[in-house]
Amino acid sequence: MGLYIGYFVCGIAIVVAIIIALVAQGKVSSAFNQYKKVDSSLDMTAAQLAERLAQEHGVNIQIGSCQGTLSDHYNPRTKTLNISQGNFNSKSLAAHAIVAHEFGHALQDKEGYQALKIRQVVVTATNFVSSLLIPIIIAGLIMNLLFFMSAGSILIYVYVGIYALSVIASLVTLPVEYNASARAKKILYEMGCTSSEEVEGTDKLLNAAAMTYVASLIVSLAYFLRMLFLLLAITRDR
């Protein structure tokens, strides 16, 4: 009974964790909407800023654009810094803070930052296992139809494995993101973004973004514990 109670409690924790994640994402959107209206003291677009940073730091990357809002990202496999269309030609403080953060990832990649390497391995493993989920579900259903009822429990093990990898990925992501944000703040400060509004705006936006990764870890952990309690309950009942 205790394990099933734990399973139920984790279900409630998931709801709470999702609410926290939504609040964190709301703070990011709020900060972005506020500071996308504030021009940076650097008279250049976000794309030009990325190019300048790449040249000054000797980082060989391609600068590209991508669709969506706040979809900016650095791809270590293709060595590409992709800037969302809304930020690409923007000279706003928000656009500069986001691009500087993504360039922080490019610097991590160049320097062989260990946490970034670990995250790539874990994310790749998670994606691979997730891609097998549908075939495993189909196989489990077929085996259940053939009266091999124990086959269905394999899915629980798979889910536990996926969520365990997800927790690890979220955990490793935290130092990667916080480090990139610290690099971004230092880069912008050294380039002349030293006014109180620029420092405050950069901190507010990047700190809010970092909280979304904390929320993601909480959500992943809640899902993992819920599936783990279910697995333990099923194993004990047998």
Image: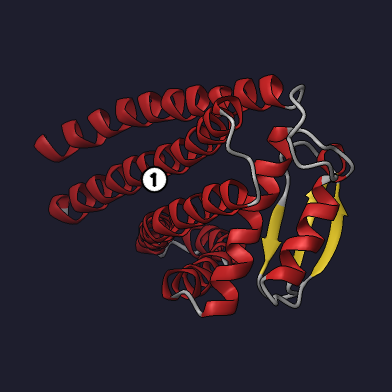
Q: Residue at x 64, y 45 (%)?
A: 192
Q: Residue 21 in the image: state x and y as whole percent.
A: 47, 30
Q: Is residue 216 visible?
A: yes
**SS class, disc 1:** helix
Q: Is residue 23 above or below residue 178?
A: above
Where residue 55 sits, quadrant-wise, is bottom right
Where residue 94 sits, quadrant-wise, is top right
Q: How many marks?
A: 1
Q: Residue 57 in the image: state x and y as whole percent.
A: 66, 71
Q: Residue at x 49, y 75 (%)?
A: 117
Which quarter of the figure is the C terminus placed in? bottom left
Q: Residue at x 54, y 27 (%)?
A: 196
Q: Residue 217 in the image: state x and y as whole percent.
A: 39, 45
Between 55 and 160, the one nearer to me in the picture: 55
Q: Residue at x 59, y 25 (%)?
A: 197
Residue that numbered label 1 is attached to? 217
The reply, left or right, for residue 176 in relation to residue 53 is left
Q: Residue 89 in the image: state x and y as whole percent.
A: 89, 42
Between 189 and 131, the one nearer to me in the picture: 189
Identity, as a three-letter code, of the amino acid under mark 1: Leu
The reply, left or right, for residue 116 in relation to residue 138 is left
Where residue 105 sits, quadrant-wise, is bottom right
Between 198 and 204, the one nearer to me in the picture: 198
Which quarter of the figure is the N terminus placed in? top left
